Image (cartoon, grey):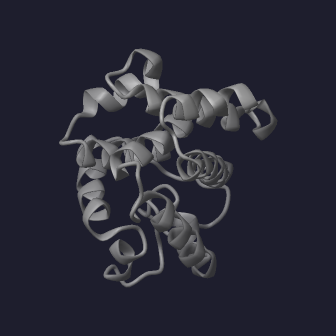
Amino acid sequence: MAHISLPDGVPGIRGPMTFRPETARPLNELVDVLLCGPHPLSSGERELIGAYVSSQNDCTYCQTIHGAIAAHHLGGDEELVRSVKRDFQHAAISEKLKALLAIAGKVQLGGKHVTSEDVDQARRLGATDLEIHDTVLIAAVFCMCNRYVDGLATWAPEDPDFYRQRAAKIAVDGYVASTLGSGTATAAG
């Protein structure tokens, strides 16, 4: 049961965003830029960063929806998503992405945990300033969204097919556009 009165049957972050739609659009626009826009990291890689941070924050809804979106972008590879959340250092991903996930994990603990050595390692493995910047911002945004979702005790569906279906829509339409057709200004995930 949510801590405040949220619309029935509207899961995760979508419930609070329906409750306060004037905050939904700017949050979704930011998420669209970070996760869907043109970028040297693929949408799947950026979604993996969000799913990983959400798993570290133990946010069921966010890690599941963003894991499903990552898997959708990565050819349906749900096992890869699980392996990144479980132990990214041994997952079948690039060394550069591993270095970026290490930075994201430190942001999840607190921004001051990121060191010059972490950034230098990412650069040695080919990460650009844009990729480093956006990794930090993705991790920070996901920490905020995870706390938004769990701080209001929102509902998270248990059916994996719910997340797969929603992921397919978001992967094609993005975050803002995928919600406009629903008649609400709700959102991410």
- The answer to whether any part of residue 115 appears in the image is no
Kindly identify the residue that appears in the image at 29 percent across and 70 percent down: 173
Residue 105 location in percent, x, y? 62, 31
In-front residue for pair 75/182: 75
- Which residue in the rendered view is the most extreme toward the right? 112
In-front residue for pair 163/99: 99
Residue 61 location in percent, x, y? 47, 46
- Which residue in the rendered view is the most extreme toward the top? 90
What is the count of numbered marks?
A: 0
Quadrant in the rendering for residue 165: bottom left
Kindly identify the residue that appears in the image at 69 percent across and 38 percent down: 107
Quadrant in the rendering for residue 102: top right
Q: Is residue 35 above or below residue 25?
A: above
Kindly identify the residue that appears in the image at 32 percent across and 49 percent down: 69
Horizontally, is 104 left or right of 174 in the view? Answer: right
Horizontally, is 148 left or right of 174 in the view? Answer: right
Kindly identify the residue that appears in the image at 28 percent across and 51 percent down: 162
Quarter of the figure that contains the C terminus: bottom left
- The answer to whether any part of residue 163 appears in the image is yes
Horizontally, is 62 left or right of 23 in the view? Answer: left
Residue 138 location in percent, x, y? 57, 50
Q: Is residue 24 above or below residue 137?
A: below
Residue 46 location in percent, x, y? 44, 47
